[in-house]
Amino acid sequence: MGIRKISHIGIAVRSLEQQKRLYGEVLGLELIGEEEVADQKVRVAMYRAGEVRIELLEPTASDSPIAKFLEKRGEGMHHVAFEVDALVPMMAQVKQQGVQLIDEVPRPGAEGQIIAFLHPKSTFGVLTELCQPGIHSPSACHSNPPQ
Ligand code: CO
């Protein structure tokens, strides 16, 4: 049980189109998926950077959690996501160690995965996601940002 690797880094962006130029054309990363997550009011573009993914998050509405983040903090790093073998035991373990969870129960992510966020108050300002890939996505944690 434990953390396998960094799954992805979430980045809050105002304009996916502008950032896609940077990550795709300038930096030359491979775009591996793009989708709108209506529930969280974001549009997501995923890039592959070796083993790690870059998750660009653009708000689709002014009450999106990412819109609120952009208002407060501006564009930039939003969260880091660690891939774990077993999410529920890992959540219990960190909670027992005094870490506050945003998600007390796992929430579903895309592609059959389950995810949970740790509160940045407990992680020295870094919004931290734990994710466990679904059986159909051996290494494809892909998340929706929390409020
Ligand atoms: Co994420």
Image (spheres, grey):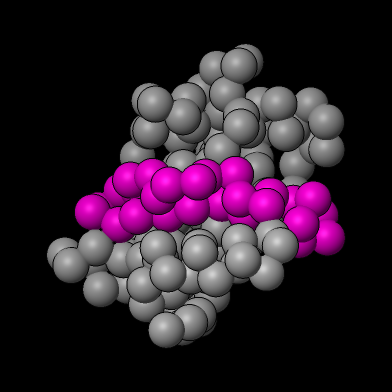
Where 53 sits versus 18, above or below? below
Q: Which quarter of the rendered picture does the C terminus lie within?
A: top right
Residue 112 in the image, given as x and y percentages of width and height: 23, 54
Task: Give the image location of residue 14, x and y in percent.
Answer: 66, 33
- Give the dominant element type of the magenta stretch: helix, strand or loop: loop
Image height check: is 58 above or below 89? above
Give the vertical position of 46 relative to 38 (above or below): below
Q: Residue at x 76, y 57 (%)?
A: 122
Residue at 38% in and 25% down = 38
| Residue sitting farthest toward the left | 136
* Residue ID at (79%, 50%): 121
Identified at 67% across, 69% down, the residue is 97
Residue 134 position in % (x across, y down): 24, 63
Determine the residue located farthest toward the top in the rendered image.
62
Q: Magenta region: which residues?
A: 100-125
Which of the image's four quarters has the N terminus? bottom left
- Can residue 16 be seen here? The reply is yes
Question: Which one is nearer the viewer's eye here, 24 or 86?
Answer: 86
Left or right: residue 114 compared with residue 40 = left
> Residue 18: percent from the left, percent from the top?
61, 41
Whether residue 19 is in magenta: the answer is: no
Residue 104 sits inside the magenta stretch: yes
- Answer yes or no: is residue 23 visible: no
Which quadrant holds residue 96? bottom right
Using residue 89 as the reference point, say whether residue 14 is left or right of it: right
Count the numbered circles shown.
0
